[in-house]
């Protein structure tokens, strides 16, 4: 499928949790004019403790570089895990632009602020040691989740269940942090007179229209495996690579709507049965639609 733009974040190359194979499947199925890498693409934090670099991760880097060489616009917006690249704001490496933030004008004329989002995370900004401890704990949960998924398949337990996602969504303080993060970003975008924001950082994919501001989070390629694509008419779609269908949250003017479109079959992880696929609720204008 050819789309106008692709937005991905939080790939965390160099770690065991990186789902490079799933990302490669996605990149093979989606071609674009623009590819925006919205932070935490390479995890320098984790690589300081130990490097886990697979052939699939190497292929991801090669595919991105190939797209840039073949004329696609590729932009890296560094996050906190690859913050060393922020020193090179405005520099291009191998046809890949580096920007700390960027204003993206969509095909429908809407202007979106592109940034990773850690600037609005009070823990990351002022308590870095706590953020590092949280990162170690999250990576441990992701690794345990792989073993748990194999056990559930052996026991023939239906449904997909993420230990890391459960811990993140059930801890009251973590949930309130997510809402505070989103509210802070939305206020900043409104103050700058923009139409929306496209970010990453919190590993919680979403497309929502909040008081006239479009909030978009790319999610991650560690646990949920999600990306945002912009179609040629400016519609934004949330692609979930763990499902045989993708939830499409279209943001036309003036209201938001939700539709369902087929996703490439190869996006389903190898060895995963239909009973193990998650059910997704997509929020739209205050309601939830079960797919």
Image (cartoon, grey):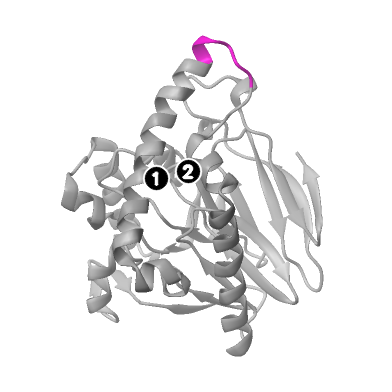
Residue 248, position as x, y percentages in the image: 69, 51
Examine the residues drawn in magenta and state their main secondary structure.
Answer: loop
Q: Residues within 10 Å of mark 1 (few under 14, many from 20)?
A: some
Q: Secondary structure at mark 2?
A: helix
Q: Residues within 10 Å of mark 2 (few under 14, many from 20)?
A: many
Which range is magenta? 153-158
Q: Which residue is mark 2?
A: 26
Is residue 5 shown above or below 193? above
Is residue 67 shown above or below 213? above
Residue positioned 43% across, 46% down in the render: 221
Please state which of residues 199 and 230 is positioned toward the viewer in this rendering.
199
Residue 5, position as x, y percentages in the image: 52, 63
Quadrant in the picture for the C terminus: top right
Mark 2 vs mark 1, CA separation in Å = 24 Å
Q: Is residue 121 left or right of residue 106?
A: left
Residue 250: quarter of image:
bottom right
Q: Which residue is mark 1?
A: 138
Residue positioned 37% across, 73% down in the render: 125
Tell me if residue 31 is in the magenta stretch: no
Is residue 147 shown above or below 166? above
Q: Which mark's residue is nearer the viewer, 2 or 1? A: 1
- Is label 2 in contact with label 1 (beta carbons under 8 Å)? no
Residue 77 appears in the figure: no
Residue 167, position as x, y percentages in the image: 52, 42
Q: How many marks?
A: 2
Residue 76, position as x, y percentages in the image: 35, 67
Please state which of residues 166 and 52 is positioned toward the viewer in this rendering.
166
Which labelled disc corresponds to residue 196? none
Residue 3: quarter of image:
bottom right
Q: Is residue 52 left or right of residue 123?
A: left
Residue 66: quarter of image:
bottom left
């Amino acid at each position: 499928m050819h789309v106008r733009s692709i937005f991905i974040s939080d790939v965390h190359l160099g770690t065991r949790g990186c789902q490079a194979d799933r990302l490669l499947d996605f990149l093979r199925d989606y071609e674009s004019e623009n590819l925006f890498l919205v932070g935490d693409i390479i995890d320098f934090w984790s690589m300081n403790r130990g490097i886990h670099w697979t052939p699939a991760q190497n292929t991801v880097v090669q595919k991105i570089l190939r797209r840039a060489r073949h004329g696609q616009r590729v932009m890296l917006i560094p996050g906190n895990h690859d913050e060393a690249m922020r020193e090179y704001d405005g520099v291009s490496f191998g046809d890949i632009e580096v920007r700390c933030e960027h204003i993206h004008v969509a095909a429908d004329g809407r202007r979106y602020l592109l940034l990773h989002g850690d600037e609005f995370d009070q823990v990351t900004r002022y308590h870095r040691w706590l953020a590092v401890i949280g990162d170690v704990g999250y990576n441990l949960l992701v690794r345990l989740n792989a073993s748990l998924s194999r056990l559930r398949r052996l026991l023939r337990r239906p449904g997909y269940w993420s230990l890391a996602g459960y811990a993140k969504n059930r801890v009251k303080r973590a949930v309130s942090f997510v809402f505070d993060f989103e509210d802070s970003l939305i206020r900043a975008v409104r103050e700058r007179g923009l139409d929306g924001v496209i970010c990453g950082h919190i590993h919680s994919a979403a497309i929502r229209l909040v008081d006239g501001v479009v909030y978009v989070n790319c999610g991650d390629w560690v646990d949920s495996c999600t990306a945002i694509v912009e179609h040629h008419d400016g519609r934004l779609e949330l692609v979930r690579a763990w499902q045989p269908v993708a939830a499409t949250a279209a943001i036309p003017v003036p209201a938001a709507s939700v539709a369902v479109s087929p996703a490439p079959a190869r996006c389903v992880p190898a060895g995963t049965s239909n009973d193990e696929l998650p059910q997704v609720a997509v929020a739209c204008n205050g309601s939830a639609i079960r797919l």
